[in-house]
Amino acid sequence: GIQALEVGSKIYCATLTGLFYYDKSDRSIHPLCKVDGFSDIFVKCMAYDKPNDMLFIAYQSGNLDIVHAGKIENHTDFQSQHEIINSININGDTAWFSGSQGITPWQTTYSQFSTSANCFGSAGTIRSAVQGKYIYVCSTSGVRRIEKNYYFINDCDSWKSISTDSCFNVVSFSGKIFGSFRGGYLKYYDENTGNWITVEHTVYNNSKSTNINSLEAGNGKMVLSTYYYIYVYNTSMTVDSISTQQGKNDVIADAQGILWIAQNSDALVNINKN
């Protein structure tokens, strides 16, 4: 699988060939496709707005479906601009879309997009995270931030660069911004000094294990996966490591503390250490 996502009692899994969900309440698997009303097949990323019960599904084509109140609403704004959505971050009533042409906020209360900010080079942006009053955005050219409520986010001079190292993921966890950087480094941003502090985790001298495959935060856990290990951090930054050589693209912890692994083989696997 490409990504795992918790939506109530369901775990959605996006794969290279489609989408399905596993219902924890009855242990059933439900494949989803165009017959069910979805507009496309090949999923790029997903996000869930829990307070508003809105499921965002972005496709490799730039197409976007929003599932809400039993209905599927299609948006072609990104597709018409030939933009690829790399990730979606939900914060309050705003969904932040990171993509090939920068970052775009979408107001859930008004069901409309705001002005995009294309200030991150030709590669665009990979992921974003909100911590405090700032929105942090990562890309191959580094990490930048701006006040999330700043009206002119398309003013590139207002974006402050806080790292020029290639960064592939940022998450907000335990009051800090964490990032996964080239070479398998996990770091957090120290607001007082303006420096990135490396968080130690086991990395072997093996080309398959030096990269961080995924970094996710939710349900009071931050989950990092490499080729050989899964690291589960709690809010006090104590860590539990799990040895697993399964090919994994994404790992999340659900509300019950169960780990869900979206594997390279288009499978969804869980690990319950409770």
Image: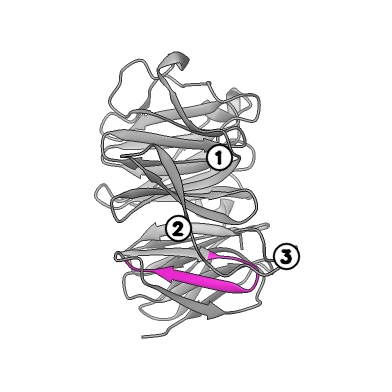
Q: Which mark is residue 208?
A: 3
For the residues bearing labels 2 and 3, Cβ distance under 8 angstroms = no
Q: CA distance from mark 2 to mark 1?
A: 14 Å
- The C terminus is located in which quarter? bottom left
Q: Quadrant of the N terminus?
A: bottom right
SS class, disc 3 = loop
Instruction: Kindly tell me whether residue 39 is visible in this rendering.
Output: no
Q: What's the distance in space between the residues labelled 1 and 3, CA to CA?
A: 21 Å
Name of the residue lying farthest toward the right? 207
Q: Is residue 101 above or below residue 185?
A: above
Question: As displayed, is residue 28 above or below residue 194?
Answer: below
The prevailing secondary structure element of the residues shown in magenta is strand
Q: Quadrant of residue 14?
A: bottom right
Q: Position of residue 117 (x, y in %)?
A: 47, 21
Labels 1 and 3: the sequence-earlier one:
1
Badge number at residue 216:
2
* Side of 197 where 234 appears, left or right: left
Q: Which corner quadrant of the image does residue 190 belong to? A: top left
Number of numbered discs: 3
Q: Earlier in the sequence, mark 2 or mark 1?
A: 1
Q: Secondary structure at mark 1?
A: loop
Rendered residue at 31%/39% (across/down): 192
Residue farthest to the front?
193
Is 10 colored magenta in this rendering? no
Q: Are marks 1 and 3 in contact (CB under 8 Å)?
A: no
Amino acid type at image mark 3:
Lys
* Magenta residue span: 225-234
- How dense is the environment of label 2, judged by Cα within 10 Å: few (below 14), some, or many (20 and up)? many
71 or 111, nearer to the observer: 111
Q: Which residue is mark 1?
A: 126
